[in-house]
Image (cartoon, rainbow, N blue to C red):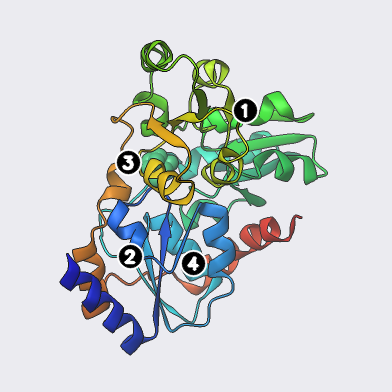
């Protein structure tokens, strides 16, 4: 592992490359990243980069977003199979039908969508800014794509009429269960439980706070309880432990593991840098259309 790290560092310098990594990446991948963050932080960072090559340790929609914001740079995704299952749930035909059915509605797409979905979107959002984005729009009716749980979270906090789509993240929707909370609450009765808004409503209602991963990092040190239970993908626990060593972080369940995120390893990053693979290619028209809703989001203060 030590040798891989050294080689990665060497190749990064030689090729003028930068590694961006999501908070759900493996611990060792987080440790070699030049920049680590949630989807919003990574999108913002991607918009400001000057290096020739961007290696994206995350899932494909994130690498696509980096490419859309940096069309002249080489963007690499180290593993072909690193994709987000929720992003793949959008049926383009169904989305077009919804747009026809509700012509007065704005389409707000979660950043966890493919470039093609973004071309049919008015504005993108992340879990950190979803309520703010929805509230910033003049339209009263919103088609919210694709996460029904984040959509429900927004619906409860917004004055708008929200039309939900039947998408979900299998990690948060299926692998984090009510029985996990009941068990862990007995084990750690004094702990604070934070969960991600991609969890179902009944899980959110059992939690002490509902936060995006970026917000978890900002808020955890302010939480008075010493022990914090983390209800999101397990990679986040490594990030929290490293950044806030004076608190104790416990994963709500070790089942909450994202297959797509965990595809990326040190070895695949090394090979990605060595052979400059797998490059993200998007046609010009798709990039131009998909850039509009991303840039709109980045402008909302
Ligand atoms: S944790 Fe869920 S939403 Fe995030 S990349 Fe994995 S499947 Fe997609």
Instruction: Point out the frontmost of discs 3 and 4.
Output: 3
Element type at marker 2? loop
Answer with the quadrant where ligand 1 appears in the image: top left
Q: Residues within 10 Å of mark 2 (few under 14, many from 20)?
A: many
Which numbered tag is attached to residue 258? Answer: 3
Mark found first going from the N terminus, 4 or 2: 4
Q: Which circle's residue, 3 or 4, is located before the other in the chain?
A: 4
The residue carrying mark 2 has its beta carbon less than 8 Å from ligand 1: no
- Dot 4: within a 10 Å radius of its alpha carbon, few (fewer than 14), some, or many (20 or more) residues? many
Disc 4 and disc 2: Cα gap in Å? 11 Å
Residue 187 on image: x %, y %? 37, 14
Quadrant including the N terminus: bottom left
The residue at which mark 4 appears reads as: 66
Indicate which disc, 4 or 1, sits on the residue closer to the N terminus: 4
Spatial distance from mark 4 to mark 1, Cα to Cα? 27 Å
Whether the residue under disc 3 has CB within 8 Å of ligand 1? yes
Q: Dot 2 corresponds to which residue?
A: 77
Circle nearer the N terminus (1, 2):
2
Q: Give the side of residue 142 with respect to residue 225, left or right.
A: right
Residue 173 placement: quadrant: top left
- Residue beneath disc 1: 153
Is 94 situated above or below 279? above
SS at circle 3 = loop
Q: Nearer the viewer, mark 2 or mark 3?
A: 3
- Contact flag, marks 2 and 3 (Cβ < 8 Å): no
Helix or strand or loop: what does disc 1 sit on?
helix
Q: Is residue 86 shown left or right of residue 29?
A: right
Q: Earlier in the sequence, mark 2 or mark 3?
A: 2
């Amino acid at each position: 592992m030590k040798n891989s790290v050294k080689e990665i560092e060497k190749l990064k310098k030689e090729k003028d490359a930068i590694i961006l990594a999501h908070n759900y990446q493996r611990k060792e991948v987080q440790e070699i990243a030049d920049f680590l963050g949630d989807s919003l932080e990574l999108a913002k960072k991607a918009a400001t980069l000057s290096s020739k090559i961007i290696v994206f340790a995350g899932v494909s929609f994130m690498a696509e977003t980096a490419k859309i914001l940096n069309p002249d740079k080489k963007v690499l995704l180290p593993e072909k199979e690193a994709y987000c299952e929720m992003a793949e749930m959008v049926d383009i035909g169904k989305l077009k039908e919804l747009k026809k059915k509700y012509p007065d509605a704005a389409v707000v797409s979660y950043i966890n969508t493919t470039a093609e979905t973004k071309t049919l979107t008015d504005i993108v959002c992340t879990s950190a800014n979803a309520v703010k984005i929805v509230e910033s729009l003049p339209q009263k009716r919103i088609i919210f794509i694709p996460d029904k749980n984040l959509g429900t979270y927004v619906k409860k906090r917004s004055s708008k009429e929200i039309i939900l789509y039947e998408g979900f993240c299998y990690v948060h929707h299926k692998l984090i269960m009510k029985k996990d909370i009941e068990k862990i609450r007995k084990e750690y009765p004094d702990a604070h439980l934070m969960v991600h808004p991609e969890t179902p409503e009944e899980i959110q209602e059992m939690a002490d706070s509902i936060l995006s991963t970026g917000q978890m990092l900002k808020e955890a040190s302010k939480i008075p309880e010493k022990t914090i239970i983390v209800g999101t993908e397990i990679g986040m626990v490594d990030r929290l432990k490293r950044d806030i060593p004076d608190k104790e972080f416990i994963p709500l369940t070790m089942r909450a593991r994202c297959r797509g995120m965990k595809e990326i390893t040190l070895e695949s990053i090394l090979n990605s840098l060595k052979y400059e693979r797998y490059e993200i290619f998007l046609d010009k028209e798709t990039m131009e259309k998909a850039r509009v809703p991303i840039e709109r989001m980045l402008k909302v203060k």
